[in-house]
Amino acid sequence: MIFETHAHYDDEAFDEDRYDLLDSMAENGIGTIVNATASKRTVEKSLELAHKYPFVYTTIGVHPSDCAEMDEAELKWLEEMCADEKAVAVGEIGLDYHYDEPSPEIQKKWFEAQIELARRAKLPLIIHSRDAAKDTLDIMKALHTEEIGGDIHCFSYPVEIAKEYLNMGFYIGVGGVITFKNGRKLREVVEYAPIEQIVIETDSPYLSPEPFRGKRNSSLNLPYVVEKIAEIKGLTAEKVIEITEANARKLYRL
């Protein structure tokens, strides 16, 4: 069964059919889903989903774009939520310099705080990094995140950066971008990376693979990602599913 390592089923894009969609996963070959969070509100909604569906788990964390209003009280609350039996990682956390706000200084502060939260909670990290390659890697090396482990979600950097993370023992999250005409950089990373350090994801409702690019994404589109990885790696789709599921279970300690 396919293991979906990163989706956002709490998103309003699923308000009309969320439960019907989740109910259909098993019959479509999707065995496990980790719902990633971005704010206190999404943590609450994601925990609700995780407790409703045995095959759904959740991360706990505040996305860099949502960290402007964070404070110590919220950090303490996040730590309490990490004790939930369905919480399997701290994330998605990191740096996003695509927009001007929040400032890099604020993002770095709460990125570092949540890394230390993961260390205390003994949970892996789910890292979001956009247009912030150097600062993300510098912080992760300075805080010895190789001791914590985790996944670089929606990997978007060249092979040179991938090598650094792979050498630290991190997994590379691969989704629909691998099917895009302009997805050459990610295809090169997948070609280089050991299959034992690749996990698959959708980032639903975002980043639908071809031929659905621009439409709402869901875990039902993961076979398109599997097929492209299989093509690049010279493996069968079944073997890719088997290995990436094992990788995801190791990543999330399930």
Image (spheres, grey):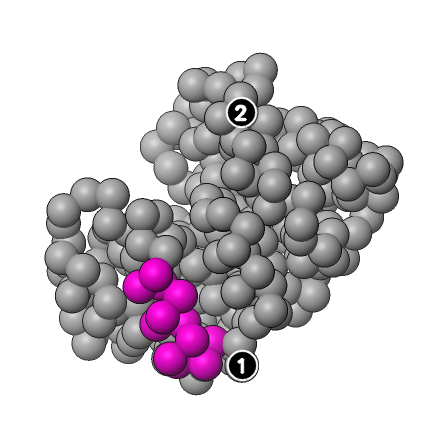
Q: Is residue 86 left or right of residue 229?
A: left
Residue 50: give x, y in percent of width and height.
Answer: 53, 53
Q: Residue at x 55, y 51 (%)?
A: 159
Pinpoint residue 57: horizontal percent, then vertical percent: 56, 55
Query: Foreground residue, 96 or 70?
Result: 96
Q: Is residue 141 visible?
A: yes
Main secondary structure type of the part rendered in magenta: helix
Report the amino acid beneath label 1: Glu
**Amino acid type of the residue tagged 2 in the rendering:** Phe
Tell me the tag on residue 76. Answer: none
Q: Which residue is mark 2?
A: 180
* Left or right: 47 in relation to 195: left
The quarter holding residue 222 reads top right
Q: Earlier in the sequence, mark 1 or mark 2?
A: 1
Name the mark on residue 147: 1
Left or right, residue 30 beside residue 116: right
The extreme front residue here reads 160
Considering the numbered disc 1 on the image, is that residue within a helix, a strand or a loop? Answer: helix
Which SS class for mark 2? Answer: loop
Q: Residue at x 49, y 57 (%)?
A: 161
Cα distance in 3D space between marks 1 and 2: 34 Å
Q: Which residues are magenta?
A: 134-145
Q: Residue at x 15, y 54 (%)?
A: 102
Magenta segment includes 143: yes
In magenta segment, residue 103: no
Whether the residues at callouts 1 and 2 have beta carbons within 8 Å, the answer is no
